[in-house]
Image: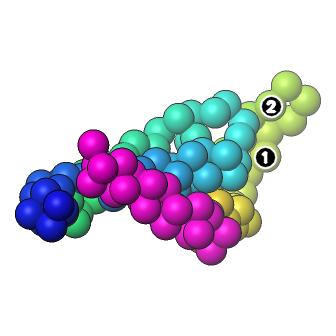
């Protein structure tokens, strides 16, 4: 049994993947939604048993999490709508945290999922 456990721990990314899947689901659930593109942009990647990540392909992910001041480099920003045109020197995007709350609130669920995955790999 001990040799089997060592083999499982050395070559399996199952427990890590299970934990990262919990985090990815939490991030997806908490991500701000207007079109759904941000929530759909997250993916889980594992590189062996001890390395993995949850990442986003969206350029808006960092801005939504931390907020930002968006300013043009040369001219003013122009927003054209049906009734009027707005010209602004900068636009402020307020922070809408969704990643940090996920890691704070879902850690125990991630640990439990990793434990279940590890136990399943050891006993089967």
Q: Measuring 61% from the left and 52% from the top, which residue is drawn there?
A: 26
**Closest to the observer: 63 or 83?**
63
Residue 109 within the segment the image draws in magenta: yes
Q: Quadrant of the N terminus?
A: bottom left
Circle 2 residues within 10 Å: few <14, some 14–19, many ≥20:
few
Task: For residue 54, say whether it is visible.
Answer: no
Labelled disc at residue 17: none
- Write down the residue under mark 2: 81
- Left or right: 48 with respect to 53? left
Residue 42: percent from left, percent from top = 46, 44
Q: Measuring 67% from the left and 69% from the top, which residue is drawn there?
A: 105
- Write down the residue under mark 1: 86
- Magenta region, main secondary structure: helix
Q: Secondary structure at mark 2?
A: loop
**Closest to the observer: 101 or 84?**
101
Q: Is residue 102 above or below residue 35?
A: below
Residue 46: percent from left, percent from top = 25, 52
Asked if marks 2 and 1 touch (Cβ < 8 Å), the reply is: yes
Outermost residue toward the right in this view:
83
Circle 1 residues within 10 Å: few <14, some 14–19, many ≥20:
few
Where does the magenta region start and end?
101-124
Q: Is residue 104 above or below residue 24?
A: below
Q: Measuring 90% from the left and 29% from the top, which residue is drawn there?
A: 83
**Closest to the observer: 62 or 55?**
55
Please count the marks in the image.
Answer: 2
* N-terminal label among 2 and 1: 2
Residue 43: percent from left, percent from top = 40, 43
Q: Is residue 93 above or below residue 29?
A: below
Residue 25 within the segment the image draws in magenta: no
Residue 96 occupies which quadrant of the picture?
bottom right
Q: Measuring 52% from the left and 62% from the top, which residue is drawn there?
A: 112
């Amino acid at each position: 049994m001990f040799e089997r456990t060592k083999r499982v721990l050395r070559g399996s990314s199952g427990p890590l993947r299970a934990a990262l899947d919990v985090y990815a689901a939490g991030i997806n659930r908490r991500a701000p939604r207007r079109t759904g593109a941000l929530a759909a942009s997250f993916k889980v990647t594992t590189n062996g048993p001890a390395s993995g990540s949850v990442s986003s392909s969206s350029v808006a992910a960092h801005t939504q999490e931390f907020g930002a001041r968006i300013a043009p480099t040369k001219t003013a920003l122009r927003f054209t709508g049906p009734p009027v045109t707005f010209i602004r020197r900068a636009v402020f995007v307020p922070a809408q945290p969704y990643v940090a709350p996920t890691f704070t609130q879902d850690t125990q669920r991630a640990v439990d999922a990793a434990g279940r995955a590890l136990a399943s790999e050891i006993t089967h």
